[in-house]
Image: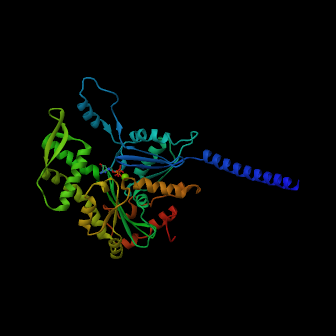
Amino acid sequence: MAVTLRLLCYSDLTDSQQDKTMVKHMLSKLSQIMSHPSIAVDLGTANTRIYVSQHGEFIERPSSISLTSGKINNISDEYLEYINNRLTTKPLRCGVIVNLQDATMLLKPLIKKSRRFLMAPITLASAPTDTTKNERDLLRKALVNAGASHVSIIPEVLVAAIGAGIDITHPNAQLLIDIGDGVTDMAVFRNGCMIYSSSVRIACSDLQKSIRSAVISKYKMQIYDYEAERLTQKVLSILNSQEHSYESFGVTGFDIIKRCKANILVKEKDIISAIEPVLNKIIKMIEISLKRLPEKIYCEILESGICLTGGGACIEGMDMLIAIRTNMEVRIASDPIHAVINGAIQTLNYWDGKKKWWENIFWPKSDRVGYASHNRPIDNIKNIEMVDFTVLHRSYGLCSNP
Ligand SMILES: Nc1ncnc2c1ncn2[C@@H]1O[C@H](COP(=O)(O)OP(=O)(O)OP(=O)(O)O)[C@@H](O)[C@H]1O
Ligand SMILES: [Mg+2]
């Protein structure tokens, strides 16, 4: 009898404990359901990537809007493909929004997916380090118009470094270069702070544009983006080897005179002379930035090497070209294309549950981060070291020695 009683008591206790756990579980589920969803956004010149933290959904699509819909009669499929290729609009140029309405249109259906019970998602977005306040305000506006709330903007190259797995809290300086579609961004991290940054609004799209323009003017042929991408890779390998083979490349495109698909041979030297000035501008920015660094920081980077992210890192030979021109070791991040969004996701997860973190993110007062941008000469880099950035990154909770 006593044993049964004790057993009953035990089962009662277990039941109540189970109930409590269940209630706790239900409450936490309820609060999760009732809380705002949060999203990380990488609105790039070529690609838009959005991560919805609540259900771990990842969306990726080109940052372009089609201006045509449906089939146009009396037009060949080839010509339609050519027209469709032309009739798209891109709301971003050089990493910044140039058309607010189109940017909103691009973001709206993506953000809609992350809304819960009509609750707008709290948003962490990234922008190139050289963006002005107005440009970041435009990004904020596009996101809010598209249905986001509490929008905070973080330097793209900082999240790229986190996403690339760089230990930015390391006492030795580390350099990251993100070569995207419209902007090349670089920054040096040390002791949890971004101590230097520089960028140039030239990147992969300019390499492809230069090739397309050269082919159209010389061969009267419109080539597709993937062909321009392929030619970029071929030429980079040749430039690195220093052994010009003077060969020609077979290219498929659209003959603008005959209005049909065609295959032609494009001379290597035409592509090289088109691409070289663009590559030189990117490399020059890196070389000038390295020269500006104090010797100590430069030596530390010499030891740690350069990490490459962005679509440009995927172009075969880009790493070698930078290595040859800088005399530094260059490595490509494990998932270079997604480094920015992966870093933003990690940052979002880190802040998850922390109260009003979005109110603590701010950019330094200067429009040009670090006053060290390529178009703002600096006299004494020591003056800018650890000033704004220490404060900035402390607020991110990423400093090892606050
Ligand atoms: N293997 C590859 N995969 C994807 N993109 C590549 C690859 N090789 C080269 N690219 C080029 O990289 C660019 C896209 O890179 P990325 O997605 O980093 O740009 P983005 O983030 O949209 O632009 P930005 O950061 O400059 O605003 C395109 O121009 C594309 O042609
Ligand atoms: Mg990018």
Above or below: residue 181 compared with residue 258 = below
Above or below: residue 240 compared with residue 50 = below
* Whether residue 11 can be seen here: yes
The x and y percentages for residue 155 are 42, 57
Residue that protrudes farthest toward the bottom in the picture: 296
Horizontal side, residue 224 vs residue 139: left or right? left
Number of numbered labels in the structure image: 0
The x and y percentages for residue 203 are 29, 53
For the point 49% across and 67% down, which residue is it?
399
Q: On the image, which quarter does residue 191 sit in? A: bottom left
* Whether residue 154 can be seen here: no
For the point 39% across and 39% down, which residue is it?
102
Q: Which of 180 and 236 is in front in this view?
A: 236
Q: Nearer the viewer, residue 64 or 387?
A: 64
For the point 69% across and 51% down, which residue is it?
24
The x and y percentages for residue 152 are 49, 52
Q: Which of 40 and 263 is in front in this view?
A: 263
Residue that protrudes farthest toward the left in the picture: 246
Above or below: residue 330 compared with residue 24 = below
Horizontal side, residue 89 vs residue 385: left or right? left
The x and y percentages for residue 206 are 26, 50
